[in-house]
Image: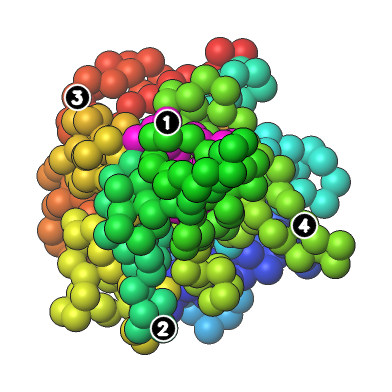
Amino acid sequence: MNLFSKRQAKIAGAILVAGALVASPAIAELIGDGALDGTPRVMLSGGSDTTYAAQVKLNTLYNEAPGCFQTVISGVATADFGKCLSGKTPTTPPALSDSVVNPQHDTVAELYPIGSGNGIKQLLDGGVTPGVPALSFARSSRALAAGNETKYLNSSAFAADGISWFHFTKVANKATVHAKLNTLTLAQLAGVYKGSIKSWNELMPDDNVLGVMNAYKDSNGKSIAVGKNNGNPETDPSKKYKTYVAIKVFMAQDGSGTRSTWDAGVKAGDSTYAAAAQVNDANGNCLNYCRIFENNAALIPAADAPTAFYYFSYGRYTQRNTDLKLAAAVYKPGAMVGNSTGQTNWADSLGQIAGTDVTPTTILNKTFPINRFLYLITKQNPAATVKNYVNFLCSASMDTAKGANGLALRPQIEAALKAEGFVPLTKGVDGGLDNNPAQSYCRTTVATG
């Protein structure tokens, strides 16, 4: 993002969040979506953490894309600052026509992540409920829910992602006892999150440490060695094993698209699955099923890390490892083991589900059990400025349309998504927001209301 774009984004955020600053009609005119009338506007997006960084990269391509020939900015403030010259389409350079990617040089700004569900709620309520800033569109890593969401909102799926279970394999230079565990079934994952599986021992019954059980005495006082299939009379699971390691379960915050997708995906392995309530001690400290902000294992306390169990977006996990510049040492995109927290002498991993790795290939062909689309959510009847941005994101016309660097935009859009670990969708026929079938890189659902 160039300096001008960054400045516009900051101004937009300040004006909309601190609503009292929207005092000037001239400023208010520039904020929000509207007509393609030659007046540059700032559109605001909010919601998902998973898609935040990718959306910022996409916005940079759009914000800097060629557009109309602007009015000359003199040293005297006028109401025409930055507007398009009316009826004057320059012939040189030919790329700067009134019908190109960003015709009136609109700018898209991203609010800090609050979660997909919360962003969707803000899109529905913003500008209507007092104190809720209006959004032009929302970021989401989950599909719209039946009800008001599908009735009043459209969704444009533009990329794919997977979610897998996460654990630390090394903490403070010491391997965790479950470091060798690399695959679990959906039923086992459901057991962890509904509370029927409480220990790492139960997930690794054949391990020569975690699988070794205590002996007990039967009703005649005879000592009997307990094997993993012999059962155990103790009701306290910590008494079943010589080396007992309880699982401390972590979950994403309420309103998280990653959490709702995980919940739905794990439920397929066990019909009795239900998201557990957080358990606190008398002082309010979390003991289990702890809520932390999605896709951020750095929020797991160091004392809990050796026994922690969590879940992670594949794209976000890839992004965190790449951003921490650890590729040369312990991580490369597509690998299962990395260090998403960046702490020295730590390591963590995304596990397999039912023997399948989470990779771009298994995500796109849906052989990985928990996969999802990433979405741009718009209102039922979006303004022309919003439609134009969706066109930039989805349309096959970007195969040849040029960006600010003079190169075709579609490869740059795909590179931005892949840089964040996500899988671009293949081109196909899609009706789009206007139900007009055309070649598109998105999959669109329109409001039913």
Few, some or many residues within 10 Å of mark 2 (<14, 14–19, 20+): some
Residue displayed at 48% across by 24% down? 270
In the image as oriented, which residue stretches furthest toward the bottom? 344
Q: Earlier in the sequence, mark 2 or mark 3?
A: 2
Q: Is residue 443 visible?
A: yes
Q: CA distance from mark 1 to mark 2?
A: 31 Å
Q: Earlier in the sequence, mark 1 or mark 3?
A: 1
Q: Position of residue 225 (x, y in %)?
A: 42, 47
Few, some or many residues within 10 Å of mark 1 (<14, 14–19, 20+): some
Q: Position of residue 222 (x, y in %)?
A: 52, 43
Dot 2 corresponds to which residue? 172
Pick whichever, 145 or 361, lies toward us: 361
Q: Name the residue type under label 3.
A: Gly
Secondary structure under tag 1 reads helix
The correct choice, above or below, for 430 with respect to 340 in the image is: above
Q: Earlier in the sequence, mark 4 or mark 3?
A: 4
Q: Is residue 317 visible?
A: no
